Image (cartoon, rainbow, N blue to C red):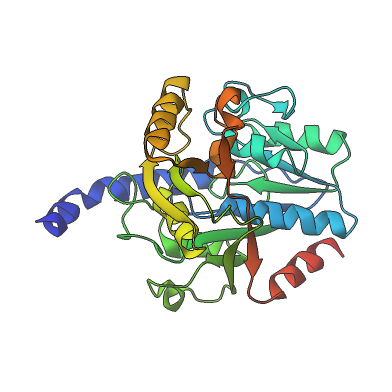
Amino acid sequence: MISFLLKLLAPIGWLYFLGTKIRMRLMPSFRTEIPVICVGNIMAGGVGKTPLVIEIVEYLKKKGQIPHVISRGYGAKLQNVKVDPNKHNAKEVGDEPLMLSQYVPVWIGKNRKYTAKSAMREGATILVMDDGFQNKNIRKDFAIIVFDGKVGIGNGLGLPIGRLREPLSEGLKRANAVVMAGKDRTKLCKKIKNVPVYFTEVAPQKIPDMRKKYLAFAGIGRPEKFYESLRILGTRVIETHSFPDHYMYKESDLRRLKRAADKKGLSLITTEKDYVRLPKTFQKETTTLPIKMVFQKPDFFKEIDRLID
């Protein structure tokens, strides 16, 4: 019954694909004076872009570059601003830009041409686009598609019936590299031709206190991925609570979570991305799981070297 309904509704996804294709063809591109790396995806929802952006900017800094990140700033109230972690909150600039601003200068705005120019005026020697693979505002010198190895391309259908923003074949035509987060459990690599694939694993930077029992909560693309990571580490996760992606927590949400945790003698734990969305009064009561993306082989960064040498 479900497969029949998907076939029936598939044309809606095709229309979404068509809209993306038309927009990509009509949108003009601006060529910046400095290199542009795009970390994007063709799947809606969390696939692991943010940890990869952090790995890339940290590598670029070690190589003597001055990277700046440009982002749309999903859900942000402000536009065309440089993110200040000491001044802005997640509602104003978006959770991912706020989190990234702890590592690198970040500019948000729907007009990437404007934010790119702002970054260059402030001394950026290379730009890293957080998302924007389907945006042609700026010419990309190195475009990366990130996949969650456990999900692949899902049911292969376009939004809103599936999670694809565009067909795999179309996206690969514009990609210079594919990064697979985790094992390729859907055998997606067999469908990827003429584009190098680099495998990564997500590793914790700090292990949670194993003496404690936790109530884990998350409002990300795939909260269960976070819970699974905790359990693999051996963390005693007794209870979980999931929220929509990019959810802006209210104090009432945290009071409810705190009551549930206290009732069972649990401690609260969440992701770094969720942490920046918490009311400050609750941040000190919540543990985070800082993570980093680790490449199985260092070959990926040779591609970056070719771009900056």
Residue 245 spot, x, y in % from top left? 44, 39
Residue at 44% of width from left, 24% of height from top? Answer: 255
**Quadrant hosting residue 99:** top right
Residue 59 seen by the camera: yes
Residue 4 spot, x, y in % from top left? 12, 57
Quick check: 185 above or below 263?
below
Quick check: 278 above or below 301?
above
Tally the numbered discs: 0
Residue 242 spot, x, y in % from top left? 38, 41
Residue 222 seen by the camera: no
Residue at 27% of width from left, 48% of height from top? Answer: 161
Quadrant where the N terminus sits is: bottom left
Quick check: 82 above or below 145?
above
Residue at 53% of width from left, 38% of height from top? Answer: 274
Quadrant where the C terminus sits is: bottom right
Residue 20 as seen in the image, left or right of residue 142: left
Residue 244 as seen in the image, left or right of residue 180: left
Residue at 69% of width from left, 70% of height from top? Answer: 300
Residue 257 spot, x, y in % from top left? 41, 32
User: Which residue ends up furthest to the left in the rendered image?
Assistant: 1
Q: Between 241 and 88, which is closer to the camera in this rendering? A: 241
Residue 252 as seen in the image, left or right of residue 122: left
Q: Between 282 and 98, which is closer to the camera in this rendering? A: 282
